[in-house]
Amino acid sequence: QVQLVESGGGLVQPGGSLRLSCASSGFTLSSYAMGWYRQAPGKECELVAAITSAGGSANYATSLKGRFTISRDNAKNTVYLQMNSLKPEDTAVYYCNLADPVLVGSRCPADFDAWGQGTQVTVSS
């Protein structure tokens, strides 16, 4: 059974940092490119970052560049999203799932939240 468990979200002040983790099970993580999706209130869900299967290349939405870093540890079956210089507009529920890096910036597919519960990130003073 495929399972993705996102964690690491929380309430942080503008300018702060968080590190999200996505622990996977039920499939061979190293065979797939992975990404982070976010669903913000009143906004379209978006694929904001993605990384190739071996971790050699990553893409980011324009609004994230220079602030967020996606990484992975295939030996630990885990994908990460380091979030720095957080802004109120980064407030959203963040999900990890399979993703094609060339699709970063596009809308989420219908099943983007099928395997995980997401983690809430709130940026507010």
Image: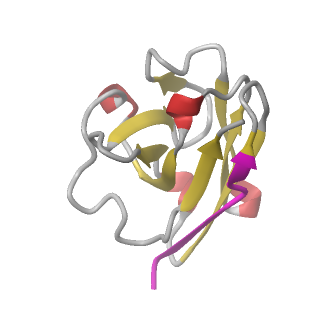
Observer-nearest residue: 21 or 71?
21
Left/right of residue 68 with respect to residue 111 in the rendered view: right
Residue 100 placement (x, y as % from top left): 35, 38
Q: Is residue 54 above or below residue 27?
A: above
User: Residue, x 40% and y 31% (percent of image)?
Assistant: 101
Left/right of residue 111 with respect to residue 67 in the rendered view: left
Q: Is residue 93 above or below residue 124?
A: below
Left/right of residue 10 with respect to residue 54 in the rendered view: right
Q: Residue furthest front?
A: 125
User: Residue, x 27% and y 32% (percent of image)?
Assistant: 106
Residue 25 in which image quadrant: bottom right
Residue 29 in which image quadrant: bottom right
Residue 94 placement (x, y as % from top left): 51, 51
User: Residue, x 58% and y 57% (percent of image)?
Assistant: 120
User: Residue, x 69% and y 50% (percent of image)?
Assistant: 20
Predominant secondary structure, magenta span? strand
In the image, the segment drawn in magenta is: 1-11
Observer-nearest residue: 125 or 30?
125
How is the rendered protein coloured? secondary structure
Observer-nearest residue: 15 or 57?
15
